[in-house]
Image: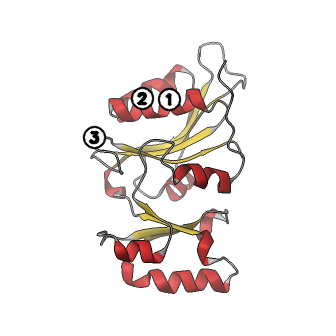
Amino acid sequence: MQEEKEILNKKQFYEMYDKNLFGNKALAWNSYKEILDSSWRGNICIRSKIGFARKKVRYNVPREKIAEIIKEFEEEGIKKESITFNQSMPDDFILIQGEVSSSDFNINEENSSPLRMRYSLIRKPMLLALAEKDEEVYGLKVLEILRHFLWENSYNNIMELLEEYPEHVIEFSSYNKEVGDIKGRNAVIWEVRKY
């Protein structure tokens, strides 16, 4: 029997995320210098690896404003070393995004799978999209929706994560174009968590 893995805090998650253990992800950097040294010229999303209020996440930051926001975070007591960056995603191309999980919660009789998904079709960063309009589905309907919106290899990525990390939440976004650091995929994994 395979030993069950648990991801119990954001620090642990980012250590694993940085090792590319969850499949396709947005292009990401751990420092402002890494961004400057890269060929990326688009906008950036700025967040904390140790966790802070999601409302503090900054989306679509132009390259010339990054240093200013890092300074603001430091003035609020957020250390530069705990800040992480990723490419701003092409929100205009979003198909579906949300959180999917597999657990032992009670489901109604018409469902034969312990899957649950909270999702949105709104074309905005996930936090904003879910706040504006979200839906929740259970069981086989989760699989039906994921199969409809995800390319096969992106769908398989999420199914593998659900199997490998039972009772964890898998955050993802999918697009009607190729995205992320693995060719041929239309969905990125944002987080895998049991916290």
Q: Give the side of residue 189 with respect to residue 16, left or right.
A: left
User: Which residue in the structure is indicated by mark 3?
Assistant: 184
**Picture layout, residue 76 above or below residue 53:** below
Relative vertical location of residue 70 with respect to residue 26 in this rendering, above or below:
below
Sequence-earlier tag: 1 or 3? 1
Image coords of residue 62 (percent x, y): 38, 77
Residue neighbourhood size for the residue with mark 3, other residues' Cα within 10 Å, grouped as few (<14), some (14–19), many (≥20): some
Q: Which residue is mark 2?
A: 156
Q: Quadrant where the N terminus lies?
A: top right
Please rate how many residues cluster around mark 1, counting C-alpha atoms within 10 Å: few if below 14, some from 14 to 19, many from 20: few
Residue 15 in picture, x, y percent from top left: 60, 54
The reply to whether callout 1 and callout 2 are in contact (CB within 8 Å) is yes
Identity of the residue drawn at 33% across and 58% down: 90
Q: Disc 2 marks which amino acid?
A: Asn
Inspect the image, locate mark 3, and give the three-letter code of the amino acid beneath it.
Gly
- Which residue type does callout 1 highlight? Glu
- Circle 1 SS class: helix
Question: Image height check: is 31 above or below 126?
Answer: below
**Residue 85 on image: x %, y %:** 48, 67
Inter-mark Cα distance, 1 to 3: 17 Å
